[in-house]
Amino acid sequence: ALSDRLSGIFESIRGKGRLTEADIDATAREIRLALLEADVALPVVKTFIAQIKERCSGAEVSKALNPAQQIIKIVNEELVAILGGETRRLNYAKQAPTVIMLAGLQGAGKTTLAGKLAKHLKGDDHSPLLVAADLQRPNAVGQLQVLGQRAGVAVYAPEPGSGVGDPVKVALDSIAEARQKGHDVVIVDTAGRLGIDEEMMQQAREIRAAVNPDEVLFVIDAMIGQDAVNTAEAFRDGVGITGVVLSKLDGDARGGAALSVRHVTGQPILFASTGEKLEDFDVFHPDRMASRILGMGDMLTLIEQAEAVFEEDQKEEMTQKLLQGEDFTLEDFLEQMQAIRKMGPIGNLLKMMPGMGGQMRQQIDSIDDKQIDRTSAIIRSMTPAERRDSSLINGSRRLRIANGSGVTVSEVNQLLTRFKDAQKMMRQMSGAMGLPTGTKATK
Ligand code: GDP
Ligand code: MG
């Protein structure tokens, strides 16, 4: 799994502060291998990796995650985005019936999917009609009739022995049948061939032209691996498709076909078929597929946890600072305001704390983003010594700081006054919380 591959890299770059070119390259190489192992097609892998590298190079350094974790987070986000981000729903016709045509190679799982989709739609209060427009295989009509019966859904098929052998006519007639019998969705099952074949494409095109479907769903076997690209291209160009269904996801396919097909067709994946039974059907979830392709659900959970723990640590640190009235410095002041801006609820929490006077409340309320940015600039123009001990900041230092941060001396003065008030209140608060002033809280 990718997580095993990457553990070596994690080791080597643990504790490094930022993403170097070499870290990105090394991690990208492993991700590339993992994607190829998951059967993502090579050209798709290349494009994807280039995109990832670009985003990683520009990435801000995260305090919560080490560089490799950060890259994986980015890879995961990009995968989810490429796989469609959010689940796309079926397009329904403004005027019933909605026509859904299925296309794909023989054995891809079209007929099975037709039954599953019909059952799914019936559960959603639709009244689907299944249409047997695969007249190629001798038992294709019978297979659909059995599925229809199991799903409790009507099936439209040519009369046995009627001599009707034209799938285009069957498909066309089924629309009239649906109107007459009040079916609001028509699902047209079509024939496939073992390989891509011009005659099959021609037939599918003709059916499409005859019934003008609202959706043409391309059903593809997830186990098909590297062939997914060719097959998807052939159906994209030969028939034209509006969506994709991945079948046989219950197998051990790593799901790379999903990425390839999505990339090649530019069309969303709507559903996943996950077994032979009618119930083995799911709306497609991009995030689940992304962790399947990366093979690292656990790692992603760890990353989420690391980020959550980091936030907790920051809150904890803040509380500690609040308890240490004496140690409260300009740097803490800055950090605190930024935290208040970032985590709104902390501001509210502070307001509810015992010993919190109206003055402090006012101060919290007066903090806005622009002011925080200006304050940050001023504090950053101070030397570390000044930040630790504000009493050092005399007249000439004030001028230097004002010039350095592009504000007036009087703004620097205001900031120092506000800071001293805050420092005083910190001391009062420690007192109100029953702690001796100046006590260093232990961590
Ligand atoms: P079609 O030729 O495209 O209509 O494919 P079928 O629907 O007839 O399916 C071909 C074979 O694959 C059948 O044996 C199905 O039972 C099986 N099949 C279809 N979908 C799935 C699936 O999601 N999982 C598994 N395990 N088997 C499936
Ligand atoms: Mg079939």
Image: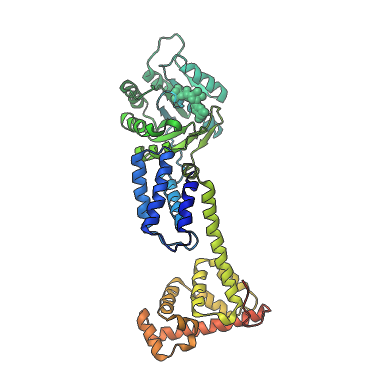
Percent from the top left, x then y, of residue 294? 47, 44
Depicted 141 relative to depicted 26: above or below? above
Q: Which color scheme does this rendered protein use?
A: rainbow
Q: Which residue: 32% across, 20% down?
A: 199
Percent from the top left, x then y, of residue 422? 54, 81
Percent from the top left, x then y, of residue 58? 36, 59
How many numbered circles are shown?
0
**Can residue 128 be seen in this snapshot?**
no
Going by the picture, which residue comes out furthest to the right? 434
Q: Can you tell which quarter of the image residue 372 is in?
A: bottom left
Percent from the top left, x then y, of residue 437? 63, 83
Judged left or right of residue 349, residue 407 is left
Who is closer to the viewer here, 6 or 167? Answer: 6
Who is closer to the viewer here, 395 or 152? Answer: 395
Judged left or right of residue 349, residue 218 is left
Q: Which residue: 47% across, 15% down?
A: 139
Q: Which residue: 59% across, 76% down?
A: 322
Who is closer to the viewer here, 19 or 182? Answer: 19
**Can residue 283 be seen in this snapshot?**
yes
Judged left or right of residue 7, residue 195 is left
Q: Regarding ligand 2, which quadrant of the image does it lie in?
A: top left
Q: Which residue: 56% across, 60% down?
A: 309
Going by the picture, which residue comes out furthest to the bottom? 395
Who is closer to the viewer here, 435 or 254? Answer: 254
Quarter of the C terminus within the rendering: bottom right
